[in-house]
Image (spheres, rainbow, N blue to C red):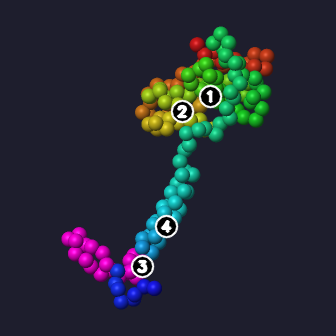
Amino acid sequence: MLNKNIKPTMNNLNGNEIAVNTAELKEQNSRREFLRSACGICGLAIAAPSLLLLPGCASTMPVFKGATLDAQKLKVPASAFASNNMMIVRNGQLDWDILLVKNSDNYKALQLKCTHRDQPLSATSTLLHCNEHGSEFDLEGKVTHGPARNNLRTYPALLENDTIIITVT
């Protein structure tokens, strides 16, 4: 059993023994724990909604990975456009993805590489955006917002026998 007459002590910086009020220490620890948890919850509550507003690194555009490359011709089945008028075409032999855009029966192929500093572009339904420095391009590949000055590289794309052929030379 503890003797209630003995007060807990500790040494201060000078090495002198001082009495410690344990109730006061418990209250300080409770305050610290409360502030830690409250600040963490408030920080999360403030940060979480803003994360939803940030553009992601990945595009929500459909990605077609089955395109075959033969003699600098990338082949994409026209049926891949069943529900969309745009898609990202990816082939492991190419350094950059290609955005394939369908307008009526015409197709346009754009290299998804920013002309400012060779960074990948994110595609939306209305524009192409470089997350590195903020350059933007329209769906024709033309610069709409710098610092990029040059338009995107485009490739000829033709429909032949239910296959879209993109010439990537």
Is residue 43 among the parts visible in the rendering?
yes
First in residue order: circle 2 vs circle 4: 4
- The total of numbered circles placed on residues is 4
* Residue at 79 percent of width and 20 percent of height: 162
Residue nearest the viewer, comparing 136 with 87? 87
Question: Label 1 sits on what residue type?
Answer: Leu
First in residue order: circle 3 vs circle 4: 3
For label 4, the residue is 37
Q: CA distance from mark 3 to mark 1?
A: 62 Å
For label 3, the residue is 27
Residue stretch rendered in magenta on the structure: 9-28
Q: Residues within 10 Å of mark 2 (few under 14, many from 20)?
A: many
Residue located farthest toward the left when viewing the structure as drawn: 14
First in residue order: circle 3 vs circle 2: 3
Q: CA distance from mark 3 to mark 4?
A: 15 Å
First in residue order: circle 1 vs circle 2: 1
Tell me if label 1 and label 2 are in contact, CB under 8 Å: yes
Is residue 145 among the parts visible in the rendering?
no
Q: Is residue 76 left or right of residue 25?
A: right
Question: Label 4 sits on what residue type?
Answer: Ser
Residue nearest the viewer, comparing 129 with 15? 15
- For the residues carrying marks 4 and 1, which lies nearer the camera in this image? 4
